[in-house]
Image: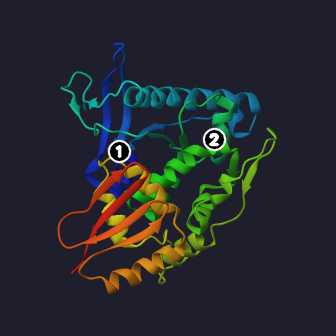
């Protein structure tokens, strides 16, 4: 199910059960790897709670959290160390199989994703604090919530940006009652509240109820009524271009900039596309340019602080 969800977003840029060997001679394995200039390292874990655990007894719950998340964190940390610190690019689908380079030479970072097979929101939002220090951005999510996010944010740029923001939430001390509230808040304003910082170590950010549109969509669809799926608001020609440039240098920076733009930018972009059917360059701000080009495939041009996403003109 994890692989199917990821393939629905990233297509052929997903590999399941990948093995690697580090420069120290240690071997490792991860459940799934999303191939991109900013890769996602994904590990799935099942948790089995006794009756004491389901009653919420602190010692039992903490033991289980450390057991499941601790092991998963170790696996994702080692994989990201291999990719980012050792510049490892080679993986194999079998422990003794022939390794091949799967990732681009230039990798700017990566996000760890830990998928739990049982829905346990407190584990997803607070489990990493119980485990201890987290060395890499890590998103803990239940399988059902992963499927929801993959359906709503169904393109590589959108999904990758959300995963990265969720991974960074560990440092921002933010939490919510459910993943749907975080996704809903992301669709509204990209969770900009996470940018707020506090010097008080006891301060916490609580994301309130934000999933009205998501609940309405799923309720109406289940009832067989017309239902409009909520979206990020980024135009399709932009998300399509990002989906086809995942290996190119500067992709992650371009995704960050695109997904951070205000809705008003995309209204102007759509008018620009209508008026410049033979091509032209649109300045989106934050050193991002969107160039309409006649023919060809989407591409990225990255120069120091500026970046240009080349978007083919549609017929």
Residue tagged 2: 170
Q: Nearer the viewer, mark 1 or mark 2?
A: 1
Numbered marks: total: 2
| Residue neighbourhood size for the residue with mark 1, other residues' Cα within 10 Å, grouped as few (<14), some (14–19), many (≥20) | many
Of the 4 image quadrants, the one containing the C terminus is bottom left
Left or right relative to 96: residue 301: right
Q: Does residue 123 appear in this view? A: no
How much space separates mark 1 and mark 2, taking CA atoms?
23 Å
Indicate the position of residue 65 as horizontal and vertical percent values: 63, 32
Vertical side of 272 occupied by 28: above or below: above
Residue tagged 1: 37
Left or right relative to 56: residue 70: left
Rendered residue at 31%/40% (across/down): 16
Image quadrant where residue 53 sits: top right
Rendered residue at 26%/76% (across/down): 279
Residue farthest to the bottom, as pictured:
275
Rendered residue at 20%/31% (across/down): 100
Rendered residue at 46%/28% (across/down): 75
Indicate the position of residue 254 as horizontal and vertical percent values: 41, 56
Indicate the position of residue 193 as horizontal and vertical percent values: 68, 57
Give the mark nearest the N terminus, 1 or 2: 1
Q: Nearer the viewer, residue 240 or 69?
A: 240
Q: Nearer the viewer, residue 255 or 214?
A: 255
| Residue neighbourhood size for the residue with mark 2, other residues' Cα within 10 Å, grouped as few (<14), some (14–19), many (≥20) | many
Vertical side of 227 occupied by 196: above or below: above
């Amino acid at each position: 199910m994890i692989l199917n969800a990821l393939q629905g977003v990233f297509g052929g840029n997903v590999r399941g059960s990948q093995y690697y060997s580090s420069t120290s001679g240690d071997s490792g394995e991860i459940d799934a790897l999303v191939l991109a200039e900013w890769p996602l390292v994904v590990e799935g874990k099942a948790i089995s709670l006794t009756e004491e655990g389901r009653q919420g007894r602190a010692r039992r719950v903490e033991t289980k959290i450390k057991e499941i998340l601790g092991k998963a964190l170790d696996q994702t940390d080692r994989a990201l160390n291999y990719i980012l610190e050792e510049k490892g690019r080679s993986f194999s689908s079998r422990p003794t199989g022939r390794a091949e380079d799967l990732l681009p030479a230039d990798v700017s970072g990566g996000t760890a994703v830990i998928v739990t097979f049982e829905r346990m929101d407190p584990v997803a939002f607070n489990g990493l604090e119980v485990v201890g220090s987290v060395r890499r951005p890590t998103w803990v999510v239940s399988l059902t919530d992963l499927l929801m996010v993959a359906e709503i944010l169904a393109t590589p740029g959108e999904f990758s940006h959300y995963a990265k923001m969720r991974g960074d939430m560990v440092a921002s001390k933010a939490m919510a009652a459910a993943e749907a509230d975080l996704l809903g808040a992301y669709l509204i304003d990209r969770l900009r509240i996470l940018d707020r910082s506090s010097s008080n170590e006891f301060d916490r950010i609580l994301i309130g109820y934000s999933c009205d549109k998501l609940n309405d969509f799923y309720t109406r669809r289940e009832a067989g009524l017309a239902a409009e799926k909520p979206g990020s608001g980024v135009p399709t020609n932009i998300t399509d271009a990002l989906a086809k440039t995942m290996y190119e240098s500067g992709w992650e920076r371009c995704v960050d900039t695109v997904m951070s733009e205000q809705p008003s930018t995309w209204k102007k972009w759509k008018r620009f596309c209508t008026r410049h059917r033979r091509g032209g360059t649109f300045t989106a701000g934050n050193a991002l340019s969107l160039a309409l080009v006649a023919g060809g495939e989407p591409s990225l041009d990255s120069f120091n602080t500026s970046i240009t996403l080349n978007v083919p003109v549609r017929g």
